[in-house]
Amino acid sequence: MESEHIKGAANKIAGKIKEETGDAIDNTEMELKGKAQQQKGRAQCAVGDAKDAVE
């Protein structure tokens, strides 16, 4: 399922940007939110992989 992969990739990229921005401005909360968003993206990609395997 392409949409899950696209959403997952978008969340991984956005999360990485948040994480790096938080690191640059010394904002731990933003860094953690970025890492969490990256995990969400990885999970979405895994769901997409599972859906592809079933099809």
Image (spheres, rainbow, N blue to C red):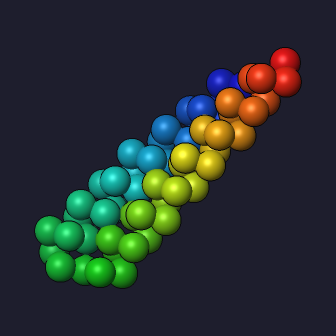
Residue reaching furthest to the right = 54
Quick one: quadrant of the N terminus? top right
Q: Please report the residue visible at 31 percent of the width from the left and 63 percent of the height from the top.
A: 19
Position in image of residue 3 (x %, y %): 66, 31
Total numbered labels placed on residues in the image: 0
In the picture shown, does residue 51 fall above or below 17?
Answer: above
In the picture shown, does residue 10 fall above or below 35?
Answer: above
Query: Residue 46's quadrant in the figure?
Result: top right
**Nearer-the-camera pick, 50 or 12:** 50
Position in image of residue 37 (x %, y %): 49, 60
Question: In the rendered view, does 2 fall on the left or right side of 40?
Answer: right
In the picture shown, does residue 28 fall above or below 52?
Answer: below
Position in image of residue 5 (x %, y %): 60, 32
Query: Residue 13's quadrant in the figure?
Result: top left
Q: Please report the residue visible at 14 percent of the width from the left and 68 percent of the height from the top.
A: 24
Q: Please report the residue visible at 75 percent of the width from the left and 23 percent of the height from the top.
A: 52
Question: In the rendered view, does 24 fall on the left or right side of 45?
Answer: left
Q: Please report the residue visible at 54 percent of the width from the left and 48 percent of the height from the top.
A: 41
Residue reaching furthest to the top = 55
Quick one: quadrant of the C terminus? top right
Residue reaching furthest to the left = 24
